[in-house]
Amino acid sequence: MEAKAQGLESVYMALSTAVASSRFVGLSYDDGMFVLFCNFDRIHVLAEPKQRFCDSSPRLVWGTQQMIWTPSWGAMTARPSARILSLSKPKKDYSEYQCRCRPVIGGRPPLAKFGYPSERLLRLAEPKKYLPAYLEQRARESPEWPVSPAARNYNASQRILELARPKPLHPDFLPAREVPTEVSKFATSASASARIQQLAEPLIREMTCCSRHTHPGPAISAVSRSQKVIVSPRTIELSRPKQLHADYAHPRDPEWPVTEAAKRAVATPRVLELAQPSARPRVGLTAYNPDAFRVKEAALKAACSQRLQELAQPILR
């Protein structure tokens, strides 16, 4: 109870200070609630729009560069720093380094720091003109037309009203959470239990494959020669490398000696004929040949066989 009374007293003192510094008339405490008495005249005064400073001062004119307050003598006699002087320098104008001798199109006067668009840009900027046939065939001269009384007095059907309703959200839809999540006061002032602190500690895994060493050395301990271990036949069999197939043929070397029979062999006329490269005209010469795609006389007089005529028939579906 004493703590509650002290809390109410501190709240009452804070509100009393706020009331004294504001325009409220008084403060009272009734049935567990603080009641502020407000001055309505002050509210009406604050509700009035703020007047411009130049309206109340005859020396100022609205829209000029005249300062409202007179600068002090200290501000006028102060020496600026090197940084302020560097920032006060105007930005360098690089327009003079651009096309200085650009020709003037259309006889316009070459004004400094002003560029005219080209004739091509002016032509592209013109709006698209309507064709005379379109102007004659269109029903209305304006995109706006009066709505008929029948359309105004039309009663929409139940189906149209149902389609006009916006699509509702799913009953289980949850809106996106805000990015900054507010942490409650209980979470910020809570103290973790011993179990939570134990779970928050990082898990330390011991390396069982390597031995521990206090000084740098081999990671895997060597087997002592005093231990006499007899290897089983299965271990010996598994330790053998994988063998190749019995019929496996190794790749032949890219260079091998030529046999004497191959050196003394004589090519037949048919082999010499097949060894000659195929003579094909170049693509450039074929393009300029007018008879390149002309059908031969023999092909024009050829008679089609019964099988070709059967295959040339379209498929009936």
Image (tube, rainbow, N blue to C red):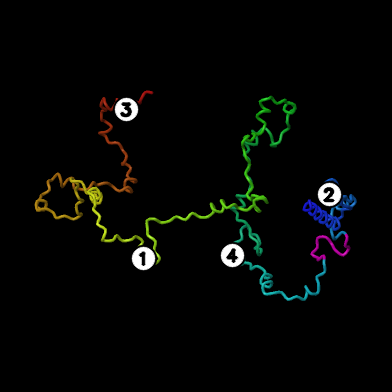
Q: Which residues are magenta?
A: 56-68
| Residue nearer the viewer, 8 or 307 | 8
Q: Secondary structure at mark 1?
A: loop
Q: For the residue marked with disc 3, what is the amino acid? A: Ala
| Residue nearer the viewer, 271 or 228 | 228
The answer for how far apart the CA atoms under marks 4 and 3 are is: 72 Å
Q: Earlier in the sequence, mark 1 or mark 4?
A: 4
Q: For the residue marked with disc 1, what is the amino acid? A: Gly
Q: For the residue marked with disc 2, what is the amino acid? A: Phe
Q: Circle 4 is placed at which residue position?
A: 98
Residue drawn at point x = 85 percent, y = 63 percent: 60
Residue drawn at point x = 49 percent, y = 54 percent: 203
Q: Secondary structure at mark 2?
A: strand
Left or right of residue 69: residue 228: left
Quadrant in the picture for the C terminus: top left
Q: Position of residue 268 (x, y in %)?
A: 12, 46
| Residue nearer the viewer, 205 or 227 | 227
Q: Position of residue 259 (x, y in %)?
A: 11, 53
The answer for how far apart the CA atoms under marks 3 and 1 are is: 85 Å
Q: Circle 2 is placed at which residue position?
A: 34
Q: Circle 1 is placed at which residue position?
A: 217
The residue mark sitting in front, 2 or 3, is: 2
